[in-house]
């Protein structure tokens, strides 16, 4: 059965990430490594997590000149990650270079290409913050604009917030995969998340993958928490 749960391993050390991964690997769909863990633990943590057999999502949100991003994507492919992120605001040429690098490097290695996911507008930014950095559109229009740009560049997936799911599903080709954080089971603490959906609601709204961190990793029994979420989908 398809398991859409991506566990965000937002922990500061390789040891904690590896311990969580060992118990969670049989019951989740993938592990997400973000900037904190990658900066602390280095590329070796990708290999350790891949050794559990689970797919790895390297969430480093690349944003640079096209050549630099292409070389970084190739390095991620050689680490054998299955999903990775780039900022859609890096521009069409950067997005095309990222997708091409992912395709070319995996073909060379005889592997399936990773899903290169476009990040549109960070949910920490509101209309006023966008205006401040010189983006004329509001957040909703900017998300849709960048989503179209990412798809035009050949990306096959996007990261989006729960409240963007419905509009993006209307706008984008159905095969585009949508990866959604901001997920909270009905009985979980909100932490600092504000507009959340439950796992079921997010899938019904069109999410392909659900990124879930604290409701699993900070639970007393992470494996039981993941199993409960899976059983409720
Ligand atoms: O613990 P929690 O479930 O809130 O973790 C959500 C994960 O998704 C974190 O790794 C967070 O950085 C990431 N994320 C998010 N909201 C976004 C983009 C990414 O919560 N808009």
Image (cartoon, rainbow, N blue to C red):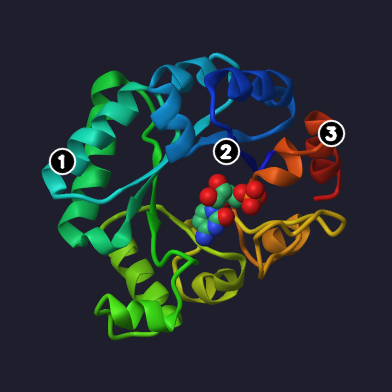
Q: Residue at x 62, y 23 (%)?
A: 16
Residue located beneath label 3 in the image: 220
Place of residue 227 in the rendered image (x, y in percent of width and height, measured from the top left): 83, 36
Using the image as rendered, state which of residue 208 and residue 162 is in the foreground: 162
- Secondary element at image label 1: helix
Q: Nearer the viewer, mark 1 or mark 3?
A: 3
Between the C-alphas of marks 1 and 2, the distance is 26 Å
The vertical placement of 111 against 197, above or below, is above
- Secondary element at image label 3: loop
Place of residue 147 in the rendered image (x, y in percent of width and height, measured from the top left): 38, 67
Residue located beneath label 1 in the image: 68
Using the image as rendered, state which of residue 107 and residue 56 is in the foreground: 56
Q: Nearer the viewer, mark 1 or mark 2?
A: 2
> Can you tell which quarter of the image residue 25 is in?
top right
Q: Is residue 185 found left or right of 164 in the rendered image?
A: right
Say the numbered circle drawn on residue 10.
2
Q: Is residue 92 found left or right of 229 in the rendered image?
A: left
Using the image as rendered, state which of residue 97 and residue 156 is in the foreground: 97
Q: Earlier in the sequence, mark 2 or mark 3?
A: 2
Q: Residue at x 40, y 24 (%)?
A: 80
- Secondary element at image label 2: loop
């Amino acid at each position: 059965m398809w398991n859409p749960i991506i566990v965000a391993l937002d922990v500061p050390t390789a040891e904690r990430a590896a311990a969580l991964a060992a118990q969670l690997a049989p019951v989740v769909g993938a592990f997400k490594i973000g900037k904190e863990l990658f900066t602390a633990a280095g590329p070796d943590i990708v290999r350790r997590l891949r050794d559990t057999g689970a797919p790895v999502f390297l969430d480093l949100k690349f944003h640079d000149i096209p050549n630099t991003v292409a070389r970084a994507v190739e390095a991620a492919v050689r680490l054998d990650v299955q999903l990775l992120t780039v900022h859609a605001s890096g521009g069409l040429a950067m997005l095309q270079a990222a997708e091409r690098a992912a395709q070319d490097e995996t073909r060379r290695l005889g592997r399936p290409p990773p899903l290169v996911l476009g990040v549109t507008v960070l949910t920490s930014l509101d209309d006023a913050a966008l205006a401040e950095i010189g983006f004329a559109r509001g957040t909703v229009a900017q998300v849709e604009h960048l989503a179209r740009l990412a798809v035009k560049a050949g990306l096959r997936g996007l990261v989006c917030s729960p409240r963007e799911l419905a509009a993006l599903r209307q706008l984008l080709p159905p095969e585009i995969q949508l990866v959604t954080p901001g997920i909270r089971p009905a009985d979980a603490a909100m932490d600092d998340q504000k507009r959340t959906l439950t796992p079921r609601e997010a899938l019904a709204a069109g999410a392909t993958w659900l990124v879930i961190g604290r409701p699993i990793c900070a639970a007393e029994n992470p494996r039981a928490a993941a199993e409960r979420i899976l059983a409720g989908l």
